[in-house]
Image (cartoon, helix red, strand yellow):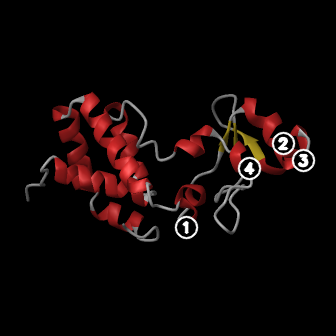
Amino acid sequence: MISPDKVRAEAKKKENENFKFRTFLKCHADEKELDRQFLRLHKEFFADYDCSKCRNCCKMYKGSIPAEDIDSDAQYLGITPEQFIDAYLEKEEYGMNYQTKHKPCDFLQEDGSCKLGDCKPDSCKKYPYTDQPERLSSLLSILDTIEICPVAFEIFERLKKEYGFRVRR
């Protein structure tokens, strides 16, 4: 598995290759089969991967908090919703939700855990989305994800091997 501190640089080196592979998949992959492949590889790689040792996603993104989660998140932290918003959040530029004020995410703790515990948003729980359906239509976002998440990087590399993909020089 690639080291969390090296994933961005390695993904940048493969940027053209990855974009060409994305195009290849768009033209040649069966959507349902690709979803099965992503899901299988997601389960395989995450079976023994400890995200708390990496947390690149928490370090490089602001957290996104749905407005409907404000009350339960505040209650979990033992503060009022108003205190929760004032201390941690700002309105997203577009939409009705909130995001954390800072990068790394304001809820990331030194040990790699989330201050929100089980209340953390679904967007965080589901990241890097490699086990979600409709991967074929979201391959462009996967290219961003493989610069952040070592597991997503490895999944994409494995898919290249499974498809026998090689870049012509």
Of label 4 and label 1, which has the lower sequence position? 1
Residue 72 in picture, x, y percent from top left:
80, 37
Of label 1 and label 3, which has the lower sequence position? 1
- The quadrant in which the C terminus is found is bottom left
Q: Which residue lies at the image location 74% right of the left edge and 49% below the top edge?
A: 116
Which residue is label 3 attached to?
A: 78
Of label 2 and label 1, which has the lower sequence position? 1
Which residue is label 4 attached to?
A: 116
Residue 33 in picture, x, y percent from top left:
25, 33
Q: Determine the secondary structure under disc 1.
A: helix
Which residue is label 1 attached to?
A: 53
Q: Amino acid at mark 1?
A: Lys
Q: Are marks 3 and 2 in contact (CB under 8 Å)?
A: no
**Going by the image, does 165 lie left or right of 52?**
left
Q: CA distance from mark 2 to mark 1?
A: 26 Å
- Residues 167 and 91: in front is 167
The tag on residue 73 is: none
Q: CA distance from mark 3 to mark 2?
A: 6 Å
Q: Amino acid at mark 2?
A: Ala
Which residue is label 2 attached to?
A: 74
